[in-house]
Amino acid sequence: MPAITVENILVLPRLPRPDAAVTRERSVTRLVTAHSQREGAGFEVRRPFPSMDLRTADPFILLDEMGPVTYEPHEAKGAPWHPHRGFETVTYVLDGSMVHHDSHGGGGVIAEGDTQWMTAGSGILHDELPAEDLVVHGGIMHGFQLWVNLPRDKKMAAPRYQDLKSGELTLVSSHDGGALVRIIAGDIGGFAGPGSTYTPIAYAHASIAPGGQLETPWPQEFSAMVYVVSGSGTVGADRRPVTSGQLAVLGHGDSITVGADAKQDSRTGDMEVLLLGGQPIREPVVQYGPFVMNTRQEIIEAIEDYQAGRMGRIPAEHLVGQRLGE
């Protein structure tokens, strides 16, 4: 897991430790175990939501963990050209690399530690495929895709693309230096990530040393969730035990606590978690595959616009490749 890191965590700025006298630590209200399913051209994902156990996670629509999986040569798969409307996709890669193209000219390689932020808005076509070297030689792939909903007045915003390189993420440590936090977007403890968002959210990846504890302020008006990527520990004021592939949904409060067990069974030796939450939109959500709108009529219009080519068209060079079966 070669996500961005530092040799000496003690040189980083530190998150303020929440003051127990004036803050309320959030407790776990629900614990969800991710289920597995296949997406795109047939690659497997672990999905904590939406699921039978957690149907909605406002302002988020979906969280998929891709891998970790080790591909043999010519075995790696991706998601060929497909449309989106009404939300944003955030792809964060830990191992391996992916290549993105879209019908609005955005694109590039999403390498280890990088984040690709695509605002579908009014409509866009894109693909996400494993890099050529991964296809030819095989190797490990591990990443995440988060779908962030857009409010009604932003659903038809112009599409845009953000390419956030690993070195651009904001790096901070816990107050005691026992955890490294990479902030992708939003404000956590007074430190802001580089991602530009329409919907106010906070999104970060934390590595917590064995026996360590991450305590951080969290916006009171935001939802809050902790997804365990690897390792084990506890989450929340109630110190709920959690392990790899589980999502802890937290209740009201203005701080989050995650503790790592003294012994970790993970590739990095640390407990690896995603911290995520945001300002609930509290609007009707109607989803049909890659379209997320507020009404059924808007879904019908999205399908018609896609079929009429009004969400863009596959660039000629990629269309030729498809015809040749590449």
Image: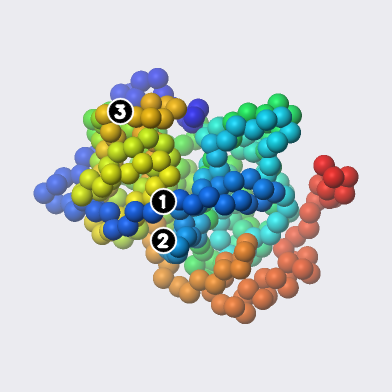
Q: In the rendered image, which residue does mark 1 sit on?
A: 33
Per the model, the C-alpha gap separating discs 2 and 3 is 29 Å
Sequence order check: which comes first, mark 1 or mark 3? 1
In the picture, measured across the screen, residue 24 lies left or right of residue 244, that is left
Residue that numbered label 2 is attached to? 53
- Which is more N-terminal, label 3 or label 2? 2
Disc 1 to disc 3, C-alpha distance = 21 Å
Residue 99 percent across, percent down from the top left: 67, 40
Q: Along the line of sight, which residue is nearer the eye, 34 or 194?
A: 34
Image position of 272 with respect to 47: above or below: above
**Which label was assigned to residue 199?**
none
Q: Residues within 10 Å of mark 1 (few under 14, many from 20)?
A: many
**Circles 1 and 2 in contact, beta carbons < 8 Å:** yes
Residue 27 higher or lower than 19, as above or below: below
Q: Quick check: can you spot residue 224? A: no
Seen in the image, is 263 located left or right of residue 24?
Answer: right
Observer-nearest of 36 and 223:
36
- Percent from the top left, x then y, of residue 90? 54, 49
Q: Nearer the viewer, residue 302 or 324?
A: 324
- The amino acid at mark 1 is Thr
Image location of residue 237, percent across then percent down:
21, 49
For image coordinates 53% across by 50% down, the residue present is 36
Q: Secondary structure at mark 3?
A: loop
Q: Is residue 117 above or below residue 110?
A: below
Q: CA distance from mark 1 to mark 2?
A: 8 Å
